[in-house]
Image (spheres, helix red, strand yellow):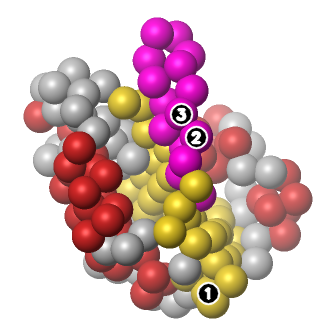
């Protein structure tokens, strides 16, 4: 089983990896794709996660192969954070790139999971799901006064 984790939030990259069931972590090669490469490697070291292959990439640019699971820890809306902090990765731009390409990287039975905090308008995100005919289950939950979106996306 091979797992790909896409992370684009500075200092938050291992959230998806640490939340991954231990059975998956212990039986898989974890590949982390991240724009905050140094911080992610440090987080893995501090959390004693050693079976990881790191690729410093912008989305899927340097990624090859097919994956059983993709965990996507998406960026948030620019309404709440300065654009500079997001390095150009907003939920709108992220969704457009992710949903146009993810099928190329999932195995036939593969599943993608994504999570992000909802800090602003979501219309563009839902339009992008429709545009790419994304089949998904959604769960929204309010924690710490913030709405969180969890999506299970199939091939």
What residue is drawn where x is 76% and y is 78%? 1
In the rendered image, residue 79 lying in the magenta stretch gets the answer no
| Quadrant in which residue 44 is drawn | top right
What residue is drawn where x is 19% and y is 55%? 93
Label 2 sits on residue: 139
- Check contact, mark 2 vs mark 3: CB within 8 A: yes
> Quick one: label 3 or label 1, which is nearer the N terminus?
1
In the rendered image, residue 149 lying in the magenta stretch gets the answer yes
CA gap, disc 2 and disc 3: 4 Å
> Quick one: label 1 or label 2, which is nearer the N terminus?
1
Eyeballing the image, is 147 above or below 106? above
CA gap, disc 1 and disc 2: 24 Å
- State the quadrant of the C terminus: bottom right
Q: Does residue 30 appear to the left or right of 119 in the view shown? A: right
Label 3 sits on residue: 140
- Report if residue 31 is visible in the image: no
Instruction: Tell which of 1 and 108 is nearer to you.
Output: 108
Label 1 sits on residue: 107
């Amino acid at each position: 089983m091979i797992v790909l984790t896409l992370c684009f939030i500075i200092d938050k990259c291992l959230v998806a990896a640490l939340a991954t069931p231990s059975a998956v972590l212990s039986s898989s090669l974890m590949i982390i794709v991240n724009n905050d490469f140094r911080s992610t490697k440090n987080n893995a070291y501090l959390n004693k996660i050693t079976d990881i292959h790191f690729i410093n990439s912008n989305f899927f640019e340097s990624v090859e192969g097919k994956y059983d699971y993709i965990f996507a820890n998406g960026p948030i809306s620019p309404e709440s954070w300065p654009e500079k902090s997001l390095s150009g990765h907003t939920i709108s731009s992220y969704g457009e790139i992710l949903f146009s390409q993810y099928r190329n990287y999932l195995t036939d039975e593969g599943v993608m999971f994504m999570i992000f905090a909802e800090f602003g308008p979501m219309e563009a995100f839902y339009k992008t799901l429709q545009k790419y005919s994304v089949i998904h289950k959604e769960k929204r939950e309010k924690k710490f006064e913030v709405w969180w979106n969890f999506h299970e996306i199939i091939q």
